[in-house]
Image (cartoon, rainbow, N blue to C red):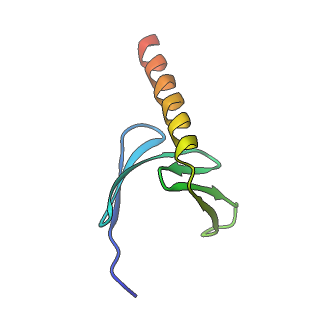
Amino acid sequence: MGLQFNRRIRLGKNIGLNISKSGISPSIRTKWGSLNPKGFSIRTGIKGLTYRKTGCLFVFSVIAILEILILLDRYANN
């Protein structure tokens, strides 16, 4: 088994930066799973079991923009 390193830095409620030896990538977590530039994962409800799919950069971009717009709207209303 090789040595692995990863760290998550929270930037907001659902937005964060993942830092690993392969680089830095943003991610968005929801109650159903998470999205990042490499793909998405879906929580199954069984501890430790997730479904992962790669290659959805467009979907990640759209959801990231929507999440940022929601955060900006909340900030402007407070």
Q: Is residue 76 left or right of residue 52?
A: left
Q: Residue at x 42, y 13 (%)?
A: 76
Asked if residue 51 is positioned above or below residue 74 in the image, the reply reads below
Q: Is residue 41 left or right of residue 73?
A: right
Q: How far from the left and from the top, in percent, is residue 47?
A: 63, 67
Asked if residue 66 is positioned above or below residue 49 in the image, the reply reads above
Q: Is residue 54 left or right of residue 1?
A: right
Asked if residue 76 is positioned above or below residue 67 in the image, the reply reads above
Quarter holding the C terminus is top left
Q: Residue at x 55, y 34 (%)?
A: 62
Q: How far from the left and from the top, in percent, is residue 52?
A: 61, 62
Q: Give the quarter of the image for residue 10.
A: top left
Q: How far from the left and from the top, in percent, is residue 37?
A: 47, 50
Q: Residue at x 55, y 51 (%)?
A: 34
Quarter holding the N terminus is bottom left
Q: How far from the left and from the top, in percent, is residue 5?
A: 32, 70
Name the foreground residue: 36 vs 43. Answer: 36
Q: Residue furthest right?
A: 45
Q: Residue at x 61, y 60 (%)?
A: 53
